[in-house]
Amino acid sequence: MLYRERQYTSDMSSQQWEIIRPLLSRQREGPGRPPELDLRRVADAIFCLDRTGCQWKNLPKDYPNFNSVYYYYGKWRDDGTWQRINEALRWQERERQGRAAEPLSKRPSLLIAKASRPPGPTASGAMTLARKSRAASGT
């Protein structure tokens, strides 16, 4: 499908679209006609709403109907699509920077090690001064 030139600053580039396209689900639950909307335009509309903060009903007319956009927004929110997109983009960016795809704090072996540490004062907790009550401070 040919795609027109970018019109809004929130629209995705072709390279960005190629990254998230496989992560967007097109299947519809239940009976009804198969979806005919261009999911790229739907995603661009959601990014426009996010960037500009406009109301759903004030979505520019270049995008699909706001009801359709809202349907896909809720569907992708509920089925974890936005979470998968975020993780994929994070992994890609970390690899681009030459870092491990998953940060050390997310690795299970480190989480177990942290959980098994005995509780004790931390550096920030040791430096906190005790607060005086209002009666003791004279205010």
Image (cartoon, rainbow, N blue to C red):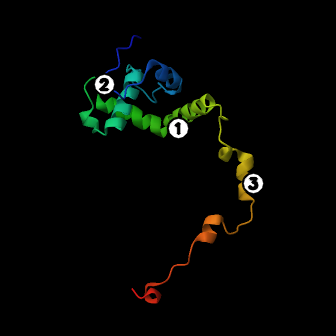
- Identify the residue shown where x is 50% and y is 82%: 132
Mark 2: which amino acid?
Answer: Tyr
Q: Which residue is mark 3?
A: 113
Judge left or right: residue 15 versus residue 61: right
Q: Earlier in the sequence, mark 2 or mark 1?
A: 2
Of the two numbered discs 1 and 3 on the same chain, state the one appearing first in sequence: 1
Q: Residue at x 48, y 25 (%)?
A: 27
Label 3 crowd bin: few (<14), some (14–19), many (20+), radius 10 Å: few
- Taking the view exactly as shown, the residue that stands out farthest to the top is 2
Task: Name the image quarter holding residue 130.
Answer: bottom right
Residue 29 spot, x, y in % from top left: 46, 30
Question: Which image quadrant: the C terminus?
Answer: bottom left
**The N terminus - image quarter:** top left
Amino acid at the residue labelled 3 = Ala
Which residue matches tag 1?
A: 83
Question: Does residue 36 appear left or right of residue 57 in this picture?
Answer: right
* 17 lies left or right of 87: left
Q: In the rendered image, which residue does mark 2 sit on?
A: 63
Classify 10 Å Cα crowding around label 1: few (below 14), some (14-19), many (20 and above): few
Mark 2–mark 3 distance (CA, rounded to whole Å): 49 Å
CA gap between label 2 and label 1 equals: 23 Å
Mark 2 burial class by Cα count in 10 Å: few <14, some 14-19, many 20+: some
- In the rendered view, does 29 fall on the left or right side of 107? left
The image's mark for residue 139 is: none
